[in-house]
Structures are given as C-alpha cells and as structure tokens.
C-alpha cells in the first residue's frame, strides 16, 4: 500500500461520490486531509465518517477568495502543503446554438479558471517545500467531446493543456502536475441516467461496466504517492478502455 503518512493534502469537491472515495482512500493511507465543498451539512457528515480529517467550506467560484482559501487550508494542515486534488466542478448543459454566454462563462470560470488559481496558489506553497503534487480531475469528454456540453468539454480539455504547461514550468522544482480523466463512474449522477442510455454507454466500454468511485481514488493515491515521482504533465485515463489515447 502506498504510504502517505504525514502528507498534507487538500481535496476539493469532497462531498460527492468520487470526492468521498478520494478522502477515504487518502485517509486510509495516512494523509492529513482538508476536505472542502460548498455543502456544510455534507462536510460535517464526511467529518463524522472520517474522524481525522479537517473540513473547510468553500465555493471555488469565488476566484478572488482562492488565495485566502489555500492559506487557511494550509494553516489547518500545520503550515505546509504536499498535494492538492482539484476535484470540484460543475456542469450547465445546453446545445451549442442555444448556449448563452452566462452558461458558457460560468462553467469555464469554475472548472478551468478556478482550477488554475487553485493550482497556482498551491504551487506557491509547494515551492517552499521544494516538492509537491497537483492532481487535476478532468473528464473523458474533454478528449472526445459530448452532446450539449461545449462549455464543459472545453473546460476539461483546457485543464489538460494548462496542467502540461504548469508541469513544464515547475518540474525542476520537484513539483508534479498531472491529470486524471474519469470515464463514466457510478455515482448519484449516473444513477439518474435512463437505463436504455446507460446500457448504450456500457456497450461502448470494453470492460462492460461503469467505473466505481474507488477506481478514481486509487489513481489519485498513486499520483499523490512517491511512486509517481517521475510522472509529470500526464493524463491518467480511468475509463475501462472506453477512450484509448
């Protein structure tokens, strides 16, 4: 098992199915965690489930507050930061010609701009340690495109390119910036998908099943650990073979 003992990690979007699984996996491996999200009730529930974690309510759409959030979260962790998992994101779907500028801008601002700012201010903290890991959660549709999601797919593709640029800039500082690109994962969101549409999706997955949140958490664990120290600027695809880059 990868050992994350004494590693200080921030996880955003921690209250969803994937976020919960990431927090659980990293905590089991000894990490000190600040779990963040917008729903205080769910954060408290998460804290009661995993006693050792710290929680900090925050909305990543508040771009001008992100630097302060990173500062507060790092202080909760004792003053240093080893890793951030940028898992939070939103969707606001519409067909291209019907998508208004507000729908476009909101998704780009939250998913791409805020992920950049989270990465930027985390890297500033990591430079003091001369090491660190940034893990950005993207999506299979950022590579394939998807009906009604021009804004979302653009934001997720942008995260990949942005992460590569940051990886080039800070590799010599012993900071690794990588992405994880989930396919279709079994969560509350996919539970709402019509069964016929779900069957159609599964028919396109060589593994013939939806992924589990733990599949993403296992990938996060690997990239957060010392075992991934020579991996930088990469995207780890976790999709059962649905998309083979």
Image: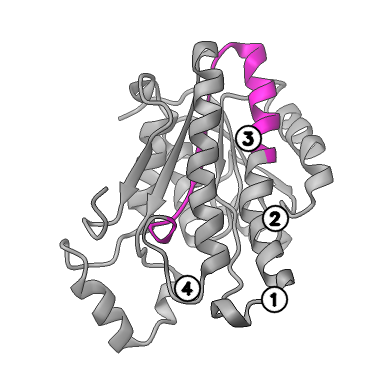
Are the residues tagged 3 and 4 within 8 Å (C-beta)? Answer: no
Depth check: 240 or 72 in front? 240
Are the residues tagged 2 and 1 within 8 Å (C-beta)? Answer: no
Q: Residue 5's x, y, as percent? A: 47, 23
Secondary structure under badge 1?
Answer: loop
Depth check: 71 or 144 in front? 144
Numbered circle sitting on residue 119: 3
Q: Residue 164's x, y, as percent? A: 48, 33
Locate residue 96: give its quadrant.
Answer: bottom right
Tell me how far mark 2 sits from mark 1, CA to CA.
14 Å
Numbered circle sitting on residue 109: 2
Give the total of numbered labels.
Answer: 4
> Is residue 177 placed above or below 58 in the rendered structure?
above
Residue located at (28% from left, 66% from top):
210
Q: What are the residue bounds of the magenta stretch? A: 117-142
Q: Mark 4 = which residue?
A: 189
Q: Which badge, 4 or 1, comes first in the chain's sequence?
A: 1
Q: Residue 218's x, y, as percent? A: 35, 43
Q: Mark 1 = which residue?
A: 100
Tell me how far mark 3 sits from mark 2, CA to CA.
14 Å
């Amino acid at each position: 098992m990868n050992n994350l003992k004494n590693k200080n990690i921030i996880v955003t979007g921690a209250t969803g199915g994937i976020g919960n699984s990431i927090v659980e996996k990293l905590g089991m491996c000894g990490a000190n965690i600040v779990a963040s999200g917008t729903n205080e009730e769910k954060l408290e529930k998460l804290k009661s489930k995993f006693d050792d974690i710290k929680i900090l309510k925050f909305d990543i759409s508040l771009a001008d507050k992100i630097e302060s959030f990173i500062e507060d979260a790092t202080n909760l962790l004792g003053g240093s930061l080893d890793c951030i998992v940028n898992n939070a994101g939103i969707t606001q779907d519409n067909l291209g010609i019907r998508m208004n500028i507000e729908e476009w801008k909101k998704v780009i601002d939250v998913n791409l701009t805020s992920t950049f700012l989270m990465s930027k201010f985390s890297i500033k903290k990591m430079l003091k340690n001369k090491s660190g890991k940034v893990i950005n959660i993207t999506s299979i549709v950022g590579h394939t495109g998807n009906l009604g999601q021009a804004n979302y797919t653009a934001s997720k593709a942008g995260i990949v390119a942005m992460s590569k640029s940051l990886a080039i800039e800070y590799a010599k500082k012993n900071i690794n910036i990588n992405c994880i690109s989930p396919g279709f994962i079994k969560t509350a969101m996919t539970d709402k998908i019509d069964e016929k549409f779900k069957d159609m999706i599964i028919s396109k997955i060589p593994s013939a099943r939806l992924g589990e949140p733990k599949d993403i958490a296992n990938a996060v664990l690997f990239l957060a650990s010392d075992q991934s120290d020579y991996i930088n600027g990469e995207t780890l695809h976790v999709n059962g073979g649905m998309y083979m880059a």
